[in-house]
Image (tube, rainbow, N blue to C red):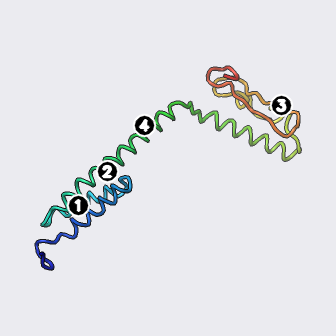
Amino acid sequence: MGSKGGASENGVGLAGFVVSLVGLVSCGILSPIGVIISIIGLFKEPRGFAIAGLIIGLVGSLFIGGIVAIFGVAMIFALGQFNWNFGLMIEVIQIEDKISAYYETNQALPQSLDELSLSPDALTDPWGTDYVYTVYPSGNTYTLQSAGEDMQFDT
């Protein structure tokens, strides 16, 4: 039986325990906060709930840390599978902007990229291969292709 304000009460330790427990149930999201509150609760007697909150909070924090690490490694692996070439992206966007402007002015797509008044450098991809521009028979859709790093189309 504890008295109000006596040595048998540790509200911070109890709060750390509760937050850590909720954190564990919520896949570790609140666990780091529970760890911090439990550490603060360790400086006041009794320490039982603070110690339990610290242990539960660390388990939950390790869980969330593991999830973040796995996700991070997966993202690094996934991004490594793609060869992002921002120079290519910028060139393609610039060409597409010119095609759109041409269409707005002429109400038709250009039949070739030569009609766009682009510099010769803008007509080749970063690997020196000419872009292939194809207007479909409908006259309102097109494709713009780069051979890519291997300089081979359709690979």
Q: Which mark is residue 38?
A: 1
Where does label 3 land, which residue?
Answer: 112
Query: Which numbered disc flags the more N-terminal residue, 2 or 1?
Result: 1
Q: x, y (%) of residue 12?
A: 22, 68
Identity, as a three-letter code, of the amino acid under mark 3:
Ser
Relative placement, left or right, of 139 versus 68 is right
Where does label 2 land, which residue?
Answer: 61
Q: x, y (%) of residue 132?
A: 76, 27
Frontmost of labels 2 and 4 is 2
- Measure the C-alpha gap from mark 2 to mark 1: 13 Å
- Provide the secondary structure element on which disc 2 rests: helix
Residue occupying image coordinates x 73% and y 25%: 130
- Provide the secondary structure element on which disc 3 rests: loop
- Measure the C-alpha gap from mark 2 to mark 3: 59 Å
Identity, as a three-letter code, of the amino acid under mark 1:
Ser
Quadrant of the drawing holding the C terminus? top right
Residue occupying image coordinates x 73% and y 37%: 95
Local crowd at mark 2 within 10 Å, few (<14), some, or many (≥20)? many
Answer whether labels 2 and 1 touch (C-beta < 8 Å): no
Query: Which numbered disc flags the more N-terminal residue, 4 or 1?
Result: 1
Query: Which numbered disc flags the more N-terminal residue, 1 or 3?
Result: 1
Local crowd at mark 4 within 10 Å, few (<14), some, or many (≥20)? few
